[in-house]
Amino acid sequence: MTARYLAGRLLQAVAVILVVTVIVFGLLHALPGGPARGILGPHAGAAQIAAFNRAQGLDKPLPVQYLYYLNTLLHGNLGSSYTLNEPVSQLIAQRLPKTLVLTVLSAIIGLVVAIPLGMWQAVRRNKPTDYLITALSFIAYATPVYFFGIVLILVFSQILPWFPPEAPQGDTLAEVLSDPAALVLPVVAGAASMVAVFSRYMRGATLENLAEDYVRTARAGGAAPRAILGRHVFRNSLTPVVAMLGYYVPVLFGGALVVEQLFNYPGMGLLFWSAAQSSDYPVLLGCVLVISVATVIGTLLADILQRLIDPRVKAGDEA
Amino acid sequence: MSVLIQSELAENAVGTAASGARIGLRRFARNRFALTGTAAIILFVVFCFLGPVFYHTDQIHTNLTQINLPPGGAHWLGTDAVGHDELGRLMYGGKVSLTVGLSAGLLATVIGTLWGSVAGYAGGWADAVMMRVVDAGIAIPALFILLVISAITTPSVPGLVVILGLVSWLVPSRLVRAETLTLKNRDYVLTLRAIGGTHRRAIFRHILPNAVSTVVVAATFQVADAILLVAYVSYLGLGVQSPQTDWGGMLSAGLTAAYSGYWWLILPPGLAVILVVCAFNAVGDGLRDAFSVRGRA
């Protein structure tokens, strides 16, 4: 990986984050009553709003205001929640790690199931098991997370009392992780569509690689099919899958929003959800910003990882 | 002279496109998954739009003497918490889900196609800026944006279509841009430019017609995703207002009832969403394989 590529890619990520701040700034101004209403709350009078606007520079032209906004963001100031009466950055700092635990666990479980599943499908292509798994992955992709979650709760908590219907309620990460049984259903709900999508990618990538010359050469040289699959095809098929992982980060966060609400898991999704119910705009916009930055970083890491594991991509960008 | 060349070029393009389409359709017709999907879509459209003609139900007035009845008798699929016939509601809600999903999916494809083709054709700085906007849009999860909007306002049905279209045009724009990058240096585009054809003509008459299979495949997947998104929208509190409903609205209304064992309130709308989304994805998959379009796996 060249330094030039890395620098260009970082610059691109910064540009994307800047555009995100423009969008969030736009949303802030699309709020009924504008940001003043958002911060002073629904009971502020017109005179109060006018005074606030003057004091905060909100009567200045929009580009100037945007620069002000960017400046406060750079100081880590996301405003204050007016229902919870705490700085938004503090609220998010408490909740983001829990959401990351949920999404990262879902992603790991999802990949650990999807990758071997997709390879197995490719090896047994066009046989009944391949068709069956394809059908199941279509169904899993098409199932709204909240519907799947309810079915999970009904079956594995109500009918078969194996797991609690509620996620761990601890305040700290250690408390959350000390109750693994309660994490099972939320993580499974979050991982289902991931298994569906990534087993399809893996199946496609494996099929493409199985048709390559190097596989035929290895076979002609007498290598065991299992060794070819494990040593060569596996690694080469992983590249497109890792690239897709970056695009999948926003979907994971979107899923966490629903899963956290459904299983009452006190992460960022639930914070966001309750902020929406009470029109707590500073929290809403702060969360959007943090989630988007997390997504941009996730995509960046996936891109870099892809280049690390695949020499062909590396050669491509030096050319 | 230039007119002659252009019409000849156009004829060639039409000729290859037509035979390509024939070959593609023949391939599509051999794909059992895709054919089943097509049949399922037709069945659902007939069920939702013609069903009410044969199965009359009152979906406006509540009937509190007939609530949460199990399937059987006069109500084939039982009744919901305010006494609406569930089967009739499934048709009634399906109309909204399918209409909104289709319109939003198509709107997203149109926006994405225009944005992607212009960005790819322009290249350079314009392309870089336009694609960073797309990256930023993708970085903000749609469900989060939709929930922010639900905190601000409750839109009408056309408003909902526009909102859904505006949050989901990003992926098709990427696909069309990639296709445009390969098409814009083809001889027929270069020839057109050399003889003084406009950029607009290059994009609309030469690049987009040749990208049509990419666009059609993207549109099919987009409709599937939009129908799924419509199911989320009611859950997030943005959905259509009572007494109107859609499958997502029925599902979220039935969620609490599910704990009381009223399975008929969530299984039918849940299965309807799953089957329709699967059907559109199967058709998209079949079209993609038939026309050898790269893109979503």
Image (cartoon, coloured by chain):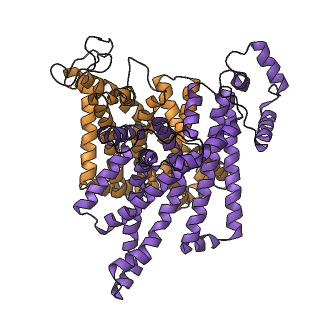
Q: Residue at x 44, y 56 (%)?
A: A109
Q: Residue furthest left?
A: B73
Give whichever of B131, B177 is nearer the camera.
B131
Q: Measuring from the top left, give residue A250's x and y in whole percent.
A: 54, 47
Where, by quadrant of the figure, is residue A1 drawn? bottom right
* Residue beneath the point at 24% across and 36% down: B43
Q: Quadrant of residue A210?
A: bottom left
Q: Is residue A219 visible?
A: yes
Q: Which chain is orange?
A: B
Vertical side of A230 occupied by A73: above or below: above
Left or right: residue B296 versus residue B285 is right
> Viewed as shown, does residue A119 lie left or right of A45?
left
Looking at the image, residue A21 sits to the left or right of residue A192; the answer is right
Where is residue B100 drawn, in percent x and y? 41, 31
Q: Position of residue A134 (x, y in %)?
A: 31, 55
Q: Residue at x 19, y 24 (%)?
A: B76
Q: Residue at 70% across / 50% down in the picture?
A: A15
Q: Considering only vertical position in the picture, is A54 above or below A21?
A: above
Is A120 in front, or is B91?
A120
Q: Which chain shows up in purple?
A: A
